[in-house]
Amino acid sequence: MKKDIHPQDYRLVVFSDDSVGFAFLTKSTATSTEVIKWEDGNEYPLVKIQLSSASHPFFTGEERIIDTEGRVDRFKARAAKAAERKQALTNKAKKTTAVKTKKETDKK
């Protein structure tokens, strides 16, 4: 194994999943500017996370959408915009075909 490639600055850090009020204390190299007073009375760096075993559907058995960054809304907006564009192109193609057919019938 290569030497000096693994971090050496492990320390106790609290990871907190605010969506369900779950927190746990573990060793990590994660950095944070926030601190929290833990159950043992000591203060530890606080890292906020969006998913944990307490909120992830795989572990909870619940099916729910956890969308803190608006991904679902952006996807729905993109899908609606694509449908509108498809309809507009279809209408344009119908108009073009109608005009072309009219010109051909006028020539005869």
Image (tube, rainbow, N blue to C red):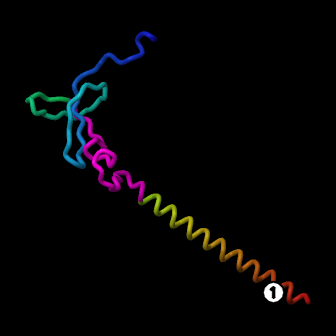
Residue plotted at (47% across, 58% down): 75
In this view, the residue in front, 35 or 78, is: 78
Q: Which of 20 and 94 is in front in this view?
A: 20
> Does 21 lie within the magenta span?
no
Name above or below for residue 19 compared with residue 87: above
Q: Is residue 11 left or right of residue 108?
A: left
Q: Is mark 1 on a helix, strand or loop?
A: helix
User: Residue placed at 19% from the left, 33% from the top?
Assistant: 35
> Which residue occupies the foreground of this view, 102 or 17?
17
Image quadrant holding the N terminus, namely: top left
Residue type at tag 1 = Lys
- Report which quarter residue 12 is drawn in: top left
| Outermost residue, right side | 108
Please identify the quarter of the rendering in which residue 73 is found.
bottom left
Residue 49 belongs to magenta span = yes
Look at the image and tell me in which quarter the C terminus lies: bottom right
In which quarter of the view is residue 27 placed? top left
Q: Is residue 59 above or below residue 29?
A: below
Identified at 20% across, 42% down, the residue is 22
Residue closest to the eye, 87 or 58: 58
Question: Badge 1 local density, few (<14 within 10 Å), some, or many (20+)?
Answer: few
Q: In this view, does 107 lie to the left or right of 44?
A: right
Q: Which residue shows up at 20% across the image and 38% down it?
A: 23
Q: Where is residue 16 in the image (x, y as percent from the top left)?
A: 23, 39
| Residue farthest toward the front in the current orientation of the protein | 61
Measured as percent of width and height from the top left, residue 9 is found at: 29, 18
10 on left or right of 3: left
Q: Residue 57 in the image: x percent, y percent?
A: 32, 49
Q: Give the range drawn in magenta.
A: 45-72
Residue 80, given in percent of the width and then of the height, sits at 51, 67
Residue under label 1? 102
**Magenta residues: mostly which secondary structure?**
loop
